[in-house]
Structures are given as structure tokens and as C-alpha cells.
Amino acid sequence: MAAEKQACMIIGAAPIDSGRLFKEFDPRHYYVICADGGYETALKAGVKPDLIVGDFDSAKEPPAKGLKVQALPAEKDVTDTMYAVMRGFGLGFRSFLLLGCLGGRRFDHTLANLEVLQYIREHGGHGIIADRATKIFLLHDEKLKMTGMKGAEVSVFPYNGSLCTVSYSGLKYPLNRAQLTCGGFPMGVSNQVVGDPAEVRVHAGSALVVVGQ
């Protein structure tokens, strides 16, 4: 595995609070792949990427010489972020942290990055998308345990299917094997952590769990 590191950090082109995020997630503990303009975020924060991939349509200027770069064609079947994850898998990684992959000027790219989470899950990996105030997890027949997070907001949505069966403990509005459906009731939006620890368990189907502070 590359440099014997256990996880891969993907930095995308969406703006992030790099000071806060890189304090929580120290890049020195990750193999860092920058997707397209994400390398500008890394370099501004003093992070030297292990690899840069992209067609650089979202970058202000191409990467400087001396960096390991894989240029991609503008016309391709996957996004730069998806390609970065595929390269990470090829290097042996199964744990991925995606930064700079929410918001920005392209809502469609945010949606595409949720598909990247699904790709990671379907290929036996574990992925998290994070920005300054939000973390997104994709769960399938598993649980998310939250400690030290009283006051955090939690929303749960069915994903890659019309429904999911979930239980909550330690949340303001608990559920016990309830079904959440797309466009149905109850809706899984805007719950809150009131216990420590708190837990979201997905019994059947897949769910996106959005945790905000």
C-alpha cells in the first residue's frame, strides 16, 4: 500500500475551511490525492499531495512542476473525484475521506459525489464526505455510533432505493425499526443528538446519514 498509510484523502475543488478540516483530519496520516482544482486548496494549506489527477477545468492554472500529476481528458465517463477514488482503490486503499466535495458552484457535482460514496460502498470500502460543519455517511445494514456530539443535527434519507428501515437511539426523536420512504412519512430530516453515545442503525436498505454541527 502506498507509503504504508491506511486511508486515502481525496481533496476536490469545492471551497473548504482547510484550517479547521486539516486540524481534525491531519493530511500526514493519509495518502492525499487531489482531484482537479483541489490541489490549489492543498497547496494553499501547505499540504503536498501524493498525487494530482484531473483535466484541470476547475483549476486556475495547471499544477507546478515537481508534483506527481496524472492528466485526464476533458471528455470521459467519470468525474475527476470518481477517478481519484478509483486510483485509490488501485493503490490498495479501502478507507476514503472526501473533502472539497460539497457545495461550490456545481450542485450536480455534489450529487455526483454521493454516487462516489455508493461506488466506495459497493466495492467493499468505507467513505465519508466532510466539510466544515457536515459529515455524510452511507450506511447499509450497519450502524453509526456518535460520541461526544450532543446538539449535533442528524438527518437520514433512503438512498439507492425507495425505502430503508432504521432505528435511532440517543436522538430527540427515536425510532424503532421504522421505514423511511422517498417522499413519504415520517421524514428523516432535522433530528438532534441528545444522548451520549447516540446511534443510527440501518436494518434494511441503504441510507445517507447527514451529521451537522
Image: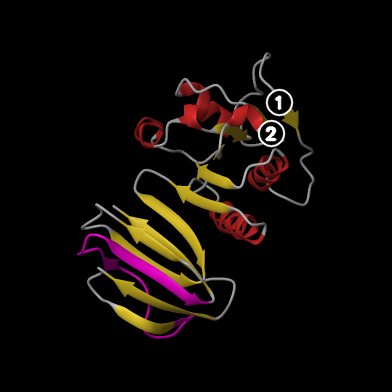
Give neighbour class at mark 1: few <14, some 14-19, many 20+ (Cα, 10 Å): some
Question: Residue 12 sits in which quadrant?
Answer: top right
Question: Residue 92 sits in which quadrant?
Answer: top right
Segment tinted magenta in the rendering: 180-204
Q: Which residue is mark 2?
A: 53
Identify the coloring: secondary structure
Image quadrant where one finds the N terminus: top right
Residue 10, labelled with which disc?
Answer: none
Question: x and y percent of residue 78 in the render?
Answer: 73, 50
Question: x and y percent of residue 179 in the render?
Answer: 43, 84
Circle 2: element type: strand
Residue located farthest toward the top when viewing the structure as drawn: 66
Q: Which residue is mark 1?
A: 69
Residue 186 within the magenta-colored segment of the rendering: yes
Amino acid type indicated by mark 2? Val
> For this view, does 140 lie left or right of residue 192?
right
> For this view, does 152 lie left or right of residue 97?
left
Q: Residue at x 57, y 29 (%)?
A: 39
Question: Residue 197 sits in which quadrant?
Answer: bottom left
Amino acid type indicated by mark 1? Val
